[in-house]
Amino acid sequence: MGKYIGAVDLGGTKILSGLFSADGETLGLPVESHTEAHLSPEKVVENICGNFSRSLKACGQSIENVSRIGIGVPTTIRYKKGLIDASPNLPTMTDYPLARVLTEKIGIPVHMEKDANCFILGEQARGAAAGCSECCGVTLGTGLGLGIITGGKLFHGHDRCAGEIWKCPYDGDILENYVSGTALVEKYAQATGEKLSGGEIHLRASGGERIARELFAQMGLALGRGLSYLVNLLNPETIVIGGSVAHSWDLFAGPMQEVIRSHRVGRNTTKITPSALGDLAPLCGAALLPG
C-alpha cells in the first residue's frame, strides 16, 4: 500500500492537486490547471487525471506510492449513491458518479466530499480554526460555499445537504449573486462595460479605482449580512474565510466586520478570520477524508 495520500480540489474554474504524507505534511506545491467545467463530464475527468498525474511527477512519485485520493467538489453529494448534485459550477456533471469513475480510471480508492467541508477540515486541522470544535468555513471563489463543524465533526444535516448558504435569499435574488467571484466580474462589467477577471478587478481596486473599490465594499456588506445569521444562530468559535476572492480581504473585510458587529448579540465572541492555509486548506481537508 502506498504511503502518500492524494488530494484534489475541483472548482468551477480551476483544479488543484497535491500529495500529503500520512501525518499531513504536503509534498511540494499544488499543481493548478483549468477545469473546463462547460465541457463533458468525461473531459472534466480527463482534466482531473491529467492534473493529478502532473502532481505525481512534480513530487517525483508514482501512483504505486499513493494509498487513496480525497477530492472536494463545489456542490452537495448524494453520499450513498456517490452522485454529484446539480451545481452551476459543474453544469454538465449532475448525477455523475465522479468518485467511482476516478477510482476505476486511476486504480486506487477515491473519496468525495463537498469542497467547503474539505476547506474547514483543513483549517481545523492545521490552520486558522486549529483546535476549534465549533467552527465554519466560508469559501469565496467562482461561487459561495459553507462548511460547518460542530462537536468536532462535520455537520451534514438531515438530507446531507447542509451549508448551502449560496442559495439563501438576498435583496430579491440569492446571496451568491452578490458574494462570489462570478458576481464581482458581472457587476464590474455592468458598471464599466469591461469584462475583467476577479484578479484584474482586485488590482484596479488596490490601485484606487473607485468603482472596483465600491464593488468590493458592497460585497463585504452582503457577506456581513449573510454571516450575521451564522454568528447569531450557530455561535461558532471561529468563521474562516478562504477561496480566491478572499485574497482581497483588505478590500471587503472592513464593511463585512462592521455589519457583523452591529448585529451580533452582546455575549457573542465569534471571530471572523481569513484562511491561514490559503489554497492548501481544501487539499489538507481532502487528504483527511476517511479511507
Image (cartoon, rainbow, N blue to C red):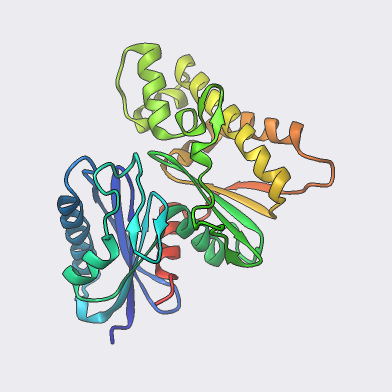
Task: Residue 208: give x, y in percent of width and height.
Answer: 48, 20
Q: Nearer the viewer, residue 71 or 60?
A: 71
Q: Going by the picture, which residue comes out furthest to the top? A: 192
Confirm whether residue 202 shows in the render. Answer: no
Q: Is residue 26 left or right of residue 107?
A: right
Q: Nearer the viewer, residue 203 or 225?
A: 225
Q: Could you say which quadrant of the image residue 231 lies in?
A: top right
Q: Residue at x 35, y 28 (%)?
A: 200
Confirm whether residue 3 shows in the render. Answer: yes
Q: Is residue 203 left or right of residue 134?
A: left
Task: Residue 188: give x, y in percent of width and height.
Answer: 39, 19
Q: Residue at x 17, y 43 (%)?
A: 39
Q: Nearer the viewer, residue 169 or 151?
A: 169
Q: Could you say which quadrant of the image residue 230 lies in?
A: top right
Q: Residue at x 27, y 60 (%)?
A: 98
Q: Is residue 216 left or right of residue 92?
A: right
Task: Residue 170: give x, y in percent of width and height.
Answer: 56, 27
Q: Is residue 108 left or right of residue 173?
A: left
Q: How many marks?
A: 0
Q: Residue at x 60, y 64 (%)?
A: 130
In this picture, is 277 found above or below 286? above
Q: Going by the picture, which residue comes out furthest to the bottom? A: 1
Q: Could you say which quadrant of the image residue 228 lies in?
A: top right
